[in-house]
Image: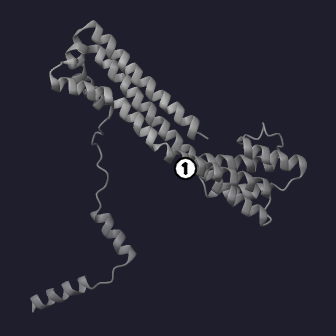
């Protein structure tokens, strides 16, 4: 009798309707919270650990050369991150301007339109929309006093000074941002080949050193123990750093907004 009752209770539990509240309680019971008191690993220790074998193999000049190589990699990464951030900002600003234009065409005043547009975006685009709303509320006309970026400030100043429709001016600025973002994205994709070639050329000296070690020429011994090797090591890494910086500069001239 007890076994039948237990079986019925088990079936009842299995067929019990699951609600959002019960799911939340179950998740709260089974979820693992963040471990407190566990020390977080600092990535800078990896850099310090990487210095030790370089110091053993190539000495202090090798550490300086490795630092220059790390600087080259960081320069390349920062350039890529800056480009992606600029593209995201331009896309968000175009979206915010589109929302503001829609509000203006529906009859909203400029301050309200900018405030509504600022709610749907974040970062620099939100700051631009709030600056536009502030300029509209306090009647700031001079484009140098609005705190707005160039094109938006000129559109606002033209609208206030000459009575041009603000919606049309902001829509023209929005179309320009969209076209510029598409051009930069397309140009960046076309520059993938030259960037790959520059990366291969930057890694070729290291491949040459490894090939020399494999053939028994002992280039690491020359670079680590002789004065000429020290000079060549620093000169080579300096040229690699200069080449990476120059390729970043050329890419920025082609792709940069």
Q: Position of residue 9 (x, y in %)?
A: 20, 86
- Point out residue 235 in the picture as x, y percentages from the top left corner: 37, 15
Residue that extends furthest to the front in the rendered view of this protein:
215
Residue 138 lies, in percent from the top left, at 81, 46
Image quadrant holding the N terminus, namely bottom left
In the image: residue 49, left or right of residue 79? left
Name the residue located 32 percent from the left edge and 29 percent from the top edge.
Answer: 204
Q: Secondary structure at mark 1?
A: helix
In the rendered image, the vertical position of residue 247 relative to residue 108, given as above or below = above
Q: Residue furthest top?
A: 227
Seen at 57% across and 38% down, the residue is 254
Residue at numbered disc 1:
186
Between residue 52 and residue 251, name the one nearer to us.
251
- Foreground residue among 84 and 141: 84
Please tell me which residue is depicted at 40% across the width and 19% down the height of the picture.
238
Q: Residue at x 27, y 42 (%)?
A: 38
Q: Is residue 142 left or right of residue 101?
A: right
| Quadrant occupied by the C terminus | top right
In this view, 212 is above or below 253: above
Binning the other alpha carbons within 10 Å of mark 1 as few (below 14), some (14 to 19) or many (20 upward) gives: few
From the viewer's perspective, is 238 left or right of 166? left
Residue 21 figure quarter: bottom left
Which quarter of the picture shows residue 117? bottom right
């Amino acid at each position: 009798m007890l076994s039948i009752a237990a079986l019925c209770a088990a079936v009842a539990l299995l067929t019990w309707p699951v609600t959002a509240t019960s799911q939340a309680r179950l998740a709260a019971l089974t979820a693992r919270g963040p471990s407190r008191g566990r020390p977080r690993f600092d990535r800078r220790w990896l850099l310090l650990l990487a210095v030790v074998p370089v110091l053993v193999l190539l000495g202090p000049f090798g550490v300086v050369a490795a630092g220059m190589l790390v600087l080259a990699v960081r320069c390349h990464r920062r350039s890529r991150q800056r480009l992606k951030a600029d593209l995201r900002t331009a896309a968000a600003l175009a979206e915010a301007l589109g929302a503001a234009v829609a509000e203006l065409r529906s009859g909203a005043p400029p301050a309200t339109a900018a405030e509504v547009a600022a709610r749907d975006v974040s970062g620099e685009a939100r700051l631009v929309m709030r600056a536009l709303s502030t300029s509209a509320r306090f009647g700031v006309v001079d484009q140098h006093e609005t705190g707005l970026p160039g094109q938006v400030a000129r559109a606002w100043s033209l609208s206030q000074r000459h009575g041009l429709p603000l919606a049309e001016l902001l829509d023209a600025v929005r179309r320009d941002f969209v076209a510029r973002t598409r051009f930069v994205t397309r140009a960046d994709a076309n520059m993938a080949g030259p960037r790959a070639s520059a990366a291969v050329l930057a890694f070729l000296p290291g491949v040459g050193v490894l090939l020399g070690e494999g053939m028994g020429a002992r280039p690491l011994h020359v670079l680590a123990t002789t004065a000429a090797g020290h000079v060549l090591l620093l000169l080579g890494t300096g040229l690699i750093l200069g080449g990476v910086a120059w390729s970043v500069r050329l890419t920025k001239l082609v792709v940069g907004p």
